[in-house]
Amino acid sequence: WERRESELAYKWGTFTSNDGDRRSLGIRPGFRGKIERSPITGRMEIFYPASKRRFKCVVSGIITVFLLAGACVVMVIAMNLQGYVTLADGEKWGVEEEAEEHPFYIPFFARLSEEGHIFDAKSAWKSFLPVILKALVVNHMNEQYSRLAEKMAEWENHETVEDHQNSIILRRVLFEAFDSYIILFYLAIYERNIMLLRLELAGAFHIDTLRRVLTECVIPYIIKHFKKDPVGASKKDDDMKKETPDGRLTAEANLEEYDTFDDYIEILIQFGYVTLFASAYPLAAFIAIGANLIEIRADFWKLNHLFRRVTPVRANNIGMWKMVLKCFAWFSAVSNLIIFAFTSSQLREWLPDYYVTDEVSGRTVPKASSAEQILLVILVIEHLALLFAISVKNAIPSIPENIRVEIQKRLWLHDELATNARNLSVQKSSLEVTSLSQSSMKVLGRPKLK
């Protein structure tokens, strides 16, 4: 991916490096500060104290933590409604007499998932109601937090457009990833129930895919199709206007502006479903391929019919998004090994002496005396996997050899041209000095220098 990215960046003339020159990244139009003389350029430029920005970032981080705590409460309620937390779970915490002391057990919501109630966890269709309800609530929370993240980034007053966007990206990814994965990690690490994990993963994955198609294409198309003309013009007159250049441009200008943030985050969350829980639901990768093929056509139609023409922006990569994708990929090695060793029975096939079958639940659980050995095996496999990944990354450079040669040639040519320009400037200055010297001597009546 990075090799192909480097090839396209060089082909399109966007393969640049702005290290050390932050202002070449583009000053944000909303950047505020005092007008002072730059010690580097000597020009009057806008400056804002970095200490104030750091303080604001800390405040924004504290606000985000409180909001994540609120999202955690919502997730706990969802787990109760889906029947993941019951009275029997109190025994896992060593509470036999009063199971209500389970830290995640909420009696009012947990009873709704019992047999015969509105969210019956054993029902074929009622069990999907809390999943759909959770998806709607999470989507609403994400929309509200996205607006708050933009306001906090504006308040922090970042200097460049890239820093401003990175601030929004990191907060939105953190919040939406927490909403999407917290229940899955609960089922994988605490419950250690591979069947519930697969069920929750499949439900969340499929409902999220369906929601994207409905909210991005179907609903906007229906709204656009049945939307009445505000000026009361007939359809024929409207079509005649669109046939002219002015009418077509006016119609496009009235469309909604396209924002890449939502599409990036949706693909990122899908990538997390596929990689972080690959050992629990391997089929997700194949479903994602089909979903992405539909998403490509849906986005193609959306960009051509529902949104204003996108203004191109020159860039050599996808920026912060690539770093987040790398973090997901590296962390997936740890999450999948945890599922491999403690949630499913996959490791038991290799080390059967380290596991037993629980008499109550019938699930595979590690022996208490073998916990250290299992942890050691997981650490060895994890280190070997990471070592292999690092070796492959270093063995295959992200910039292909032909692109690296072309870049070196361009840099050499730039240096040669700069050297020739300096030599010509020196020669021109020398000739001017000699000419002035001869002119001054002629005025004074002295013989010319040979």
Image (cartoon, helix red, strand yellow):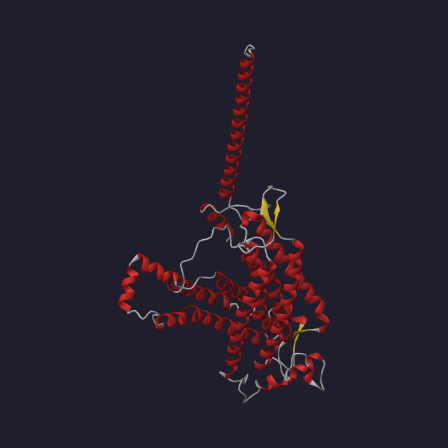
Task: Kindly indicate the quadrant of the structure image that contains residue 173.
Answer: bottom right
Q: Residue at x 57, y 74 (%)?
A: 197
From the viewer's perspective, is 9 left or right of 78? left
Q: Residue at x 34, y 70 (%)?
A: 229
Foreground of the two, 351 or 188 = 188
Foreground of the two, 446 or 434 = 446
110 is higher (above) or lower (below) than 54: below
Task: Kindly indicate the quadrant of the structure image that contains residue 436.
Answer: top right
358 is higher (above) or lower (below) than 377: below
Foreground of the two, 314 or 150 = 150
Task: Kindly indicate the quadrant of the structure image that contains residue 20.
Answer: top right
Q: Position of residue 236 (x, y in %)?
A: 26, 67
Q: Is residue 69 visible?
A: yes
Q: Position of residue 241 (x, y in %)?
A: 29, 62
Q: Is residue 277 visible?
A: no
Q: Position of residue 447 (x, y in %)?
A: 55, 10
The quarter in which the C terminus is drawn is top right
The number of discs equals: 0
What is the residue that sits farthest to the bottom in this orientation?
116
Q: Position of residue 25 (x, y in %)?
A: 54, 49
Foreground of the two, 267 or 378 = 267
